[in-house]
Amino acid sequence: MIISEIRQSNNPYIKLNKNASELDVPIHLINHKVIERYENCNCFDTNSINVDGVEKQVNFFSENVTYDLCCEDNNFRYIWRNVSFKQLKDTDALCVFADSKADIYSKTANENEKVLYFININIKFWKLITSIAAIFIAIIVLSQLPLKNIVSDVRSSIPQIENPFAGVFNWENKQNEQISGDETTEIDNSLPDEMVEEPVKEEIVEEQENVIEKKQDFSYTSDNYKGKGVTYVLLEKEKYTPRLVVTDEAKTIAEITDEANGIIGINASAWNEEEALNFTYADGNWISDNKRAYEGDPLSFANGELSVIDHKYATKKMLEKSDPEWIATGYKAVIFNTYSTNEDDEESYNRSFIGQLKNGNYIVGVMENASYSDMVEWARGIYGYDISILYNTDKGDTCGLYINNEEIYTGTLVKNAIVF
């Protein structure tokens, strides 16, 4: 693992070493992509840092303090010793970085993994011993049996087919015709009536094909949360990938989705009164490469993962470094990096959203008459802390949701949509 690959699920923290005493400070990722000019780095939110319940009581630039960056995954605990920090310009973001050749100073197995490892080794060892013993006993037992008689008895009990044919064989009739003693019975090689194949009717085949086409591996849910309607669908990451589809002229979400051969579509970007967009990138091209239209956090999709960057320090150069497949700028993430939330928008609107769970599955939907607080409460109630990001794409009349040939919310005409 390198520093730029740390995720919030790795439970990152900074260990401060000062005057022979150590202090562990948990940190929360702002973004897990490479940021600005630093190589092999990650940026963390100092607003979320607290020590003994007191926020931001750590001086990260004291000459008398050295720092270790720590995190873990399912198997190992990683420690980078004497890492360096940079404060991003005009923000509270703290950039933890090292050069591109930085190595892990310590990589140790988690204690739980050590225990499980030895348990698994012991289990495998005893399974092997048991299997060998069973085989040895079986060989001894079989060596004492009259093998020839057993084989001949088994063969004699199996009906023999003199003239085999392709198809289903009626064993009951055949057993009644077995040779008994010296008598021989003439075998009728003609097929019984029930064995004659009839041509399959084309109507039945067509009907079966239609049934297969209509079968879906997802379904949408329409619910009510505190009097607010919410419709959403959960999609498996192995089967569905979100795409940003941009059109030359304004269309309905249904039209954009159908033309892109999708089955689910939702409005993507927001825009101002002059219909100007913030950062929007699709099919290798920038539709808009600035943030002058309004205040909105860019949503980036890269390597199957959704991430969001704060509007305050989003730049084109920064976004390009994440090597995105697409970027759309709606409003803001109401849940990001699993534990962080944004509840500053208290106005109630219909709000379209896209999100992602820790296992990578996607969630798409619309919540009616909702504030950001409503969206956070609803998402936490359904998914708890399994949801890593929930992003408000737009609000009001533009909210459109199209699922499997059904317009759940029609919405106004738009020029881009997220399509699955």
Image (cartoon, rainbow, N blue to C red):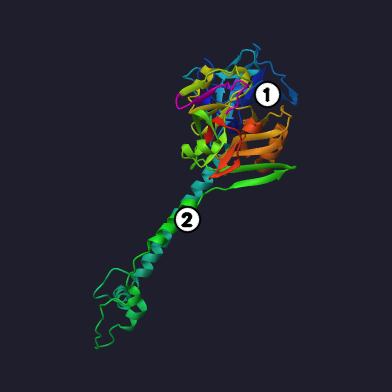
Nearer to us: label 2 or label 1: 2
- Residue at disc 1, secondary structure: strand
| Residue that numbered label 2 is attached to | 211
C-alpha span from label 2 to label 1? 62 Å
266 or 181: nearer the viewer: 266
| Residue that numbered label 1 is attached to | 23
Report the magenta residues as a range: 269-284
Q: Where is residue 333 in the image (x, y as percent from the top left)?
A: 63, 29
Q: Where is residue 180 in the image (x, y as percent from the top left)?
A: 29, 86
Q: Is residue 17 left or right of residue 34?
A: right
Q: Can residue 338 be seen in this view?
A: no
Residue positioned 64% across, 43% down in the render: 231
- Residue at disc 2, secondary structure: helix
Amino acid found under the numbered disc labelled 2: Val
First in sequence: mark 2 vs mark 1:
1
Asked if 39 appears above or below 157 in the picture, the reply is above
280 or 135: nearer the viewer: 280
Residue positioned 61% across, 12% down in the render: 89
